[in-house]
Amino acid sequence: MIDYAWFIFLTPIIFAPISAIAGWRRKASAGVIASLSIFISLILSILVFLSIRDQSTPIYQSYNWFSNINAGIYIDHLAIVMALMVSFVSLMIHLFAMYYMKDDPRKNIYFGETALFTGGMLGLVLSSNLLEFFLFWELVGVCSYLLVGFWFFKPNAASAAKKAFIVTRVGDLLFIIGLAMLYSLLNAAGVSGPLSIPYLISNSGAVVSAIGGQNLTIVTLLFLGGAAGKSAQFPLHVWIPDAMEGPTTVSALIHAATMVTAGVYLVARLLPLYSTSVFASDAVLYIGAFTAVFAGTIGIVVNDLKRILAYSTISQIGYMMGALGLVSIIGQSAVGLSIYHLVVHAVFKALLFMVAGVVLLTLMDLRDVKHMGGLWKKMPITMTLFFIGSITLAAVPPTAAYFSKDTIIDASYQYYLLNGKGLEYILPWLFMVLGALTTGLYTFRMFYLVALGKPRSKLAEEAKDPPVVVLIPLMILAGLALTLGLIQYRFYDFITSNARVISIPVIPSYMPLFMVLVSFVIITIFYGTGAWQKIDLSRSRIYRLLKSKYYLDALYTRGIAERVILPLSSGVSRAESGFSRSVEKTGGGAMAFGSLLRRIQSGVVEYYFVFLVLSVGIIMIILELMGGI
Amino acid sequence: MFIVYIFILLLIMTLVSFVVKRAAHKIATVESVIILFLTAIYAYLRFYSYTGGMMSVASFPIDTSIGISFLVGVTPVSLALLFLTTVIMAMAIFVSGRESYDRRFYGLMMATEAGLYGLLISRNFLFFYVFWEAIIIPVFLLIALFGGKNREMASLKFFVYTQLGSVFLLLSILTLFSFYNTSYHQGFTLNMGKLLSTAFINSYITSAQPFWTDFILFGFFFAFLVKMPSFPLHSWLPDAYNSAPYPVTIVLSGAISLMGGYGFYAVIYPIAGAIGFMVAWIVLLLGIISLVYFGLVAMFQENMKKMMSYASAASMGFISISLGVGILSSGYNTYTSITGGVFQILAHGLIMGLIFSSLYIIKLNTGSESTLTVRGLFREMPIVSAFFLGGLMASLGLPGLAGFIAEASIVLSSYSTIGMIIFFVIFGMIITASYHIWAAQKSLNGPYNEFLGSIRDGTRGEIAALSLLFVLILALGIYPAIFYHMIFIYVKGGI
């Protein structure tokens, strides 16, 4: 008898093909069926949540999959929080998508794929085995590939889908190497369930002694590589901005709220393994913190509304990752910090993306913020929602992100304090504070350009609000964005019992808020007055560096793909055809030798006689040389 | 005995296909489906009752004084491959229906199937060798008679190459045969179980005859690596795959390619005790080189048939890796690796069957198979394109599909043997993923190439066949235990 919790992820997977097929004839039914299946998942998640809320023993059930690898479900507090978040946000987005995709002729395929995606994501969250986890990991990856390329006839979309797939695949294969190390070394040590998540997280000490601390560090770093690919951390972040070519609801669902946080979830899930090695946890911290500021700086100069949000996603995930890296000083409490920000981010980023979707729909897919402006007057309800999303993104108090993000920044200051105030230990905090500054900069810039000022295009002048009823999911999310801050400490305690309370000196603790203020002032000076239209930044070197995304994209496509891989491939295929020809020449050589021998068979008896004598002579000589008969 | 009846039925059907003039395609389809059905029933009955050892053993003595008898037996390895053979043959015969081939074609196809069937059920080296040879002839004729451009050259190359491999196979068999009599003093036998038994190999070959051990191993490896094909013995492959008509390409990539792998697990793995450290490493490295090398070559092809034929060879590299790792490590790493290798043959065959079948339909409808001409196909042929994409995804090892189970088994268990060389394997897999996705992006996505005009999707029958194949791949990916479990028991029990 399998637990009903299995159906949290099985329901959307089962309903996915049904919705695609039923929607073939009756287009409207596809969205309803998909949303219904996710609603069922949400209800089941809530039931499971209620049943394990007060107990610390997780639900664990598994069956043999193949070889000595089991597959099943493992639901502890961390997993159920993620499942609740995924099913809830996904449901909101599905409801909105019924409006957003209403005119698309292939929307049955769309809803089939998003339902499948949601099922995959829930499966990933509940997996009890790393290989099963990897299966869902790739399933959501392929759904992302299909959905980014949903409008396959657009060359941009097709190429973005390809890029997304290949870049995440690089991360995935690092993940596979890590799995291989863990599996084969633990097998050699005689462990019975080498990749089972409950085993790994509750016996991290035994794992260290079985495979050696150094190997485990490498394993965790490889997992971090996989997580960086999926969660778009530096240097594998390049695919997300391009992935914005897909439908906006897809960006909201996959590239903001759920799939891109899978990497964070992976690290959070296996955090006991990271806590065995300071090097590994520091790597997580520094990569996360650096990404937070790195992506933020690019976000300041981007003009595409969706891409601004994409860079902000990368930056925010950097905070979640960085929070996990603090495991070396605050232990398992780091999971609470990270996941709380993850949940808050999912809520307000889904909201922002759906607002962007509304804007794009009214502005006929115009995405350049420089051609918008003055939308607050034209579409007041939408823009109020946009305002709530924006201040949450910028972490203005008392929105939820103020509580979730600033706690992480504070904790990183504690990292500096507890490591003996060494100068290098201030870096994570510095990155994160500067990240907060850039967050403020791109957020307020985006808001000013979109919502305030005068309309700067014909389309913006004619914009108007959609029917209020379709905005209900957005309003729910906006309400949550404002109020989730209330449950901060209860949340931490739910994830890890007796979570540590972060307390640091007053001045550094107000730094992030001060940064928000600074950014607000700067942006108001530039964009509040229209001064930005007079300044030509394109000659500034820093501007060009940011605009070209630090040349990383160019390095990958032109430097690695075109200068290394393609020449290698063409060289090898030239070698291959040369090799093939040389094999044929060997055949030709055999033929030539044969025709040479044919000449001996001339029919002249004297020749035969000469050859006979010669051969007998040679044989005699050989026998003589070998020592006689 | 059941399996022998199926085999005899298959022989009769082959004859029928050669003789009956009318409705050759229909007859052959029905025949191959019947064989598929019977084999599937046989396999199904064995899945859950299997506890180890050989199934359906039967012996028909012919000349016992020199050890010749038609000895029949089925192991889980051969059962999995029998199933693969029958699926692929049914598929290849069915999709060839739109082109009007005559009875010679279908007779030869059925003869190929009969040869493979015979090879997989014989447990006597004489018949093993006879069927090994017998398969080459119908395939040679199929390419030579019905192939595309360069067909004479390609078929000849195929023939000579594989013939060269067979010679060494025969020499190895005869060496074993003679030592069994002269050193072991157990009389004449060609029974595979006896000639490959640990008692005989370990005490009378490995230590007593170092030179002949190498000789025997070289012969076997050479024969099987040519068939696989592995780098550097592969140059028959691109020509044969490309010049062959599509149905034969399906057979070549799906069914004929299993012969090398079958040889590995049925002949070489039982004598693993004789294989030294060096030899195992050479095989392993050949596998890795094949994976990377064929991947890089495939990446540069714009003809998708050519690209996929190299892709097929690249994924056969995993089988060499699996054998090498299996020999060099121990315990669960060995079991998982070897089982993964066998599973890879099965998965690879099914996946290539799906890819080449859908490519065949694309070729028939658009008249082209080049990524330069075939573009944006999703608009006009959404369903066949989806299956083609499914095949590509399965081929690059996407979890949830059969190929992943095999590749994961091999890669996961390999680390403790090969260490950081695993990066080359992963590099090969990244290359594989890249060109698969590029092929999909160019041919299926993007704007439609309007010069192709208005074309139709596949027919209902074709779509049904493709979806059955895809469902099979999906089922084996999600619930691999169907075959994996019994192969695992067999491997764990010691072959």
Image (tube, coloured by chain):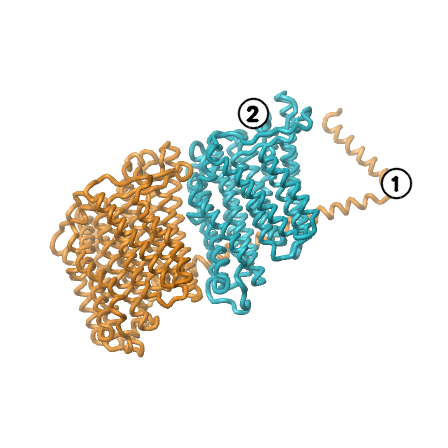
Instruction: Give how far across and how far down residue A40 sits, in percent.
Output: 29, 52
- Residue A343 in percent (x, y) is at 24, 54
Is residue A38 left or right of B359 when viewed as pictured?
Answer: left
From the viewer's side, name the closer residue of A247 and A501: A247
* Amino acid type shown at disc 2: Ser
Q: Is residue A83 left or right of residue B87?
A: left
Find out whether the residues at labels 2 and 1 contact each other: C-beta distance under 8 Å: no
| Horizontal side of residue A528 vs B135, given as left or right | left
Q: In the figure, residue B217 lies in which quadrant?
A: top right
Image colour assigned to chain A: orange
- Cα separation, mark 2 vs mark 1, equals 52 Å
According to the picture, the residue beneath numbered tag 1 turns out to be A605
x then y, percent, for residue B361: 56, 58
For disc 1, the chain is: A
Where is residue A144, by image quadrant? Answer: bottom left
Q: Residue furthest right?
A: A605
> Chain B colour?
cyan
Q: Nearer the viewer, residue A491 or B332?
A: A491
Identify the residue shown where x is 58% and y is 35%: B3
Where is the N terminus of chain B found, in terms of image quarters? top right
| Numbered badge on residue B207 | 2
Give the mark toward the camera: 2 or 1: 2
- Please tell me whether mark 2 sits on a helix, a strand or a loop: loop
Mark 1 falls on what kind of element? helix
Quarter of the image holding residue A150?
Answer: bottom left
Task: From the top left corner, tell me how far across and down residue A408 is, in percent.
Answer: 20, 52
Q: How many marks?
A: 2
Can residue B424 be seen? no
Image: B270 above or below A378:
above
Q: Is residue A558 at all visible to an observer of this figure?
A: yes
Q: Are marks 2 and 1 on the same chain?
A: no
Instruction: Identify which amino acid the numbered label 1 is placed on.
Output: Val
